[in-house]
Image: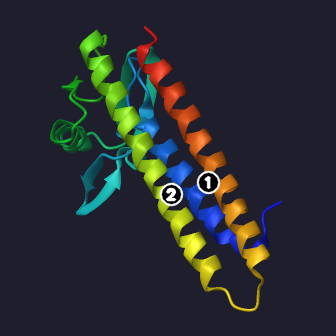
């Protein structure tokens, strides 16, 4: 049970995990995943919108995503947005549907992606450790509590940090395994 004074810090650590999870969803690991389109915005009548807001996105095959815009004129806009992104895939279209065919990943590319996964995991750990530092500073500045309670709270903060770092390590390991699964 977390001390109520530490709950805001635990919530911030949880947000770091959520953020890492959404980062991992956008990493393509050999299989088509519609979440790789999450960060791509398309110009829809002057406002930047998610592709999912202007089209149906489907995964008909393991390595293909189809995007069917609700308005035919959006095909060119969506295609332009995908080309401008860092997705690294050239879209093809038949005038109505855009197809993204994901090539089989090479071993070298898988290693690159795994490095990126590890780097994102390290960034999340740094965020958690910064939150730990903030929590420790908060506890040290508390007035009207004994040194024993300060020590106890610092111990709780460390346990909480260790728990979140362990979760991040597990997420990195799982995503890395996914990247190397052919």
**Could you tell me residue 165's position as x and y percent?**
57, 45
Q: Mark 2 points at which residue?
A: 129
| Residue at the front extreme of this rendering | 147
Toward which corner of the image does residue 80 lie, by quadrant?
top left
**Could you tell me residue 12's position as x and y percent?**
57, 63
Badge 2 vs badge 1, beta-carbon distance below 8 Å: yes
Which quadrant holds the N terminus? bottom right
Q: Mark 1 points at which residue?
A: 161
Q: Looking at the image, is mark 2 or mark 1 earlier in the sequence? A: 2
Q: Which residue is drawn at 78% across and 75% down?
A: 149
User: Is disc 2 placed on a helix, strand or loop?
Assistant: helix
User: Is disc 1 placed on a helix, strand or loop?
Assistant: helix
Circle 1 Cα neighbour tier, 10 Å, few/some/many (<14 / 14–19 / ≥20): many
* Residue 138 appears in view: yes
Question: Vertically, is 123 above or below 4?
Answer: above
Toward which corner of the image does residue 15 lie, by quadrant?
bottom right
Residue 3 falls left or right of residue 167: right
| Residue at the bottom extreme of this rendering | 144
Which quadrant holds the C terminus? top left
Question: Vertically, is 20 above or below 143?
Answer: above
Q: Work out whether residue 141 or residue 34 is closer to the camera in this orientation and state it.
A: 141
Q: Which residue is drawn at 45% across and 28% down?
A: 58
- Where residue 21 is drawn, which disc sits there? none
**Could you tell me residue 132's position as x and y percent?**
56, 63
Question: Vertically, is 34 above or below 156?
Answer: above
Residue 111 falls left or right of residue 85: right
Residue 160 falls left or right of residue 123: right
Separation of marks 2 and 1 at Cα, in angstroms: 7 Å
| Residue at the right extreme of this rendering | 1
Q: Which residue is drawn at 31% across and 10% down?
A: 104
Colour option used: rainbow
* Residue 106 appears in view: no
């Amino acid at each position: 049970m977390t001390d109520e004074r530490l709950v805001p810090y635990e919530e911030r650590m949880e947000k770091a995990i959520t953020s890492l999870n959404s980062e991992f969803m956008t990493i393509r690991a050999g299989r088509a995943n519609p979440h790789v389109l999450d960060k791509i915005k398309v110009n829809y009548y002057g406002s930047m919108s998610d592709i999912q807001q202007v089209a149906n996105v489907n995964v008909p095959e393991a390595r293909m995503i189809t995007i069917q815009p609700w308005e035919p004129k959006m095909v060119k806009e969506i295609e332009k947005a995908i080309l401008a992104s860092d997705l690294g895939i050239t879209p093809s279209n038949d005038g109505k549907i855009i197809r993204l065919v994901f090539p089989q990943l090479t071993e070298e590319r898988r290693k690159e992606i795994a490095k990126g996964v590890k780097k994102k995991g390290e960034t999340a750990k740094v965020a958690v450790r910064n939150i730990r530092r903030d929590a420790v500073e908060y506890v040290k500045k508390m007035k009207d509590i004994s040194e024993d309670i300060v020590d106890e709270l610092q111990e709780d903060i460390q346990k909480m940090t260790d728990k979140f770092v362990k979760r991040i390590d597990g997420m990195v390991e799982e995503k890395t395994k996914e990247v190397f699964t052919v």
